[in-house]
Image (spheres, rainbow, N blue to C red):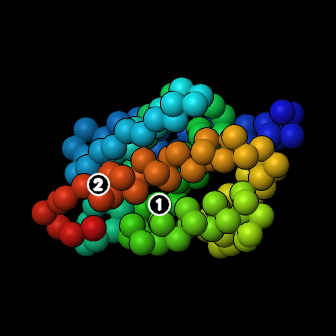
Amino acid sequence: MDELYQKELLRLAALAVGHGRLADADASATVDNPLCGDRVTVDLKRSDGRVAQVGHVVQACLLCQAAASIIGAHAAGHTAVEIEAVRSAVADMLTGTGSAPDGEWSELAAFAPVAAHKSRHTCVLLPFDALLRAAAEPAEASF
């Protein structure tokens, strides 16, 4: 398991970018992983069909915490379709059928060692799933 908890993942989790609930969120969603007990709640503010701000509370392992922190750092300004594309790229990286996203999402490459641990893939993807579920909630302005 030491290979999963590398310094970069520890650093990302400790940053906890976006940690905390948003008092005036447009949408919220909570997702659970019943296999390990991980729980992620994501709050969103939206503007012009894009994420304006993300807040999250992660009661989960370091992998979930690090993924949520990356989302907190980079989701603002993106549409749900763009976030889904990032999630798909991460899922492909974890299954060995693709590579990590580049550009502003390149920190997600830190999860490459998780590929060898199929039971932990959900831990990395759970914060994305919470964000996408919140994004799917109806709002006055289309997201």
Q: Separation of disc 2 and disc 1 at Cα?
A: 11 Å
Amino acid found under the numbered disc labelled 2: Lys
Visible in this render: residue 110? no
Q: In this picture, is 64 found above or below 132? A: above
The secondary structure type at the circle numbered 1 is: loop
Residue 119 appears left or right of 4: left
Amino acid found under the numbered disc labelled 1: Ala
Instruction: Between residue 92 and residue 99, name the one nearer to us.
Output: 92
Kindly identify which residue carries mark 2. Answer: 45
Q: In this picture, is 61 found above or below 8? A: above
Q: Which numbered disc flags the more N-terminal residue, 2 or 1?
A: 2
Rendered location of residue 11, percent (x, y)? 71, 41
Q: On the image, which quarter does residue 94 sit in?
A: bottom right
Visible in this render: residue 116? yes
Rendered location of residue 32, percent (x, y)? 46, 35
Kindly identify which residue carries mark 1. Answer: 75
- The residue sitting at the left extreme is 140
Rendered location of residue 115, percent (x, y)? 77, 52
Rendered location of residue 15, percent (x, y)? 61, 40
The structure residue drawn at horizontal position 84% and vertical position 33%, both measured from the top left corner, is 1
The structure residue drawn at horizontal position 25% and vertical position 72%, both measured from the top left corner, is 48
- The residue sitting at the right extreme is 3
Q: In this picture, is 40 found above or below 81? A: above
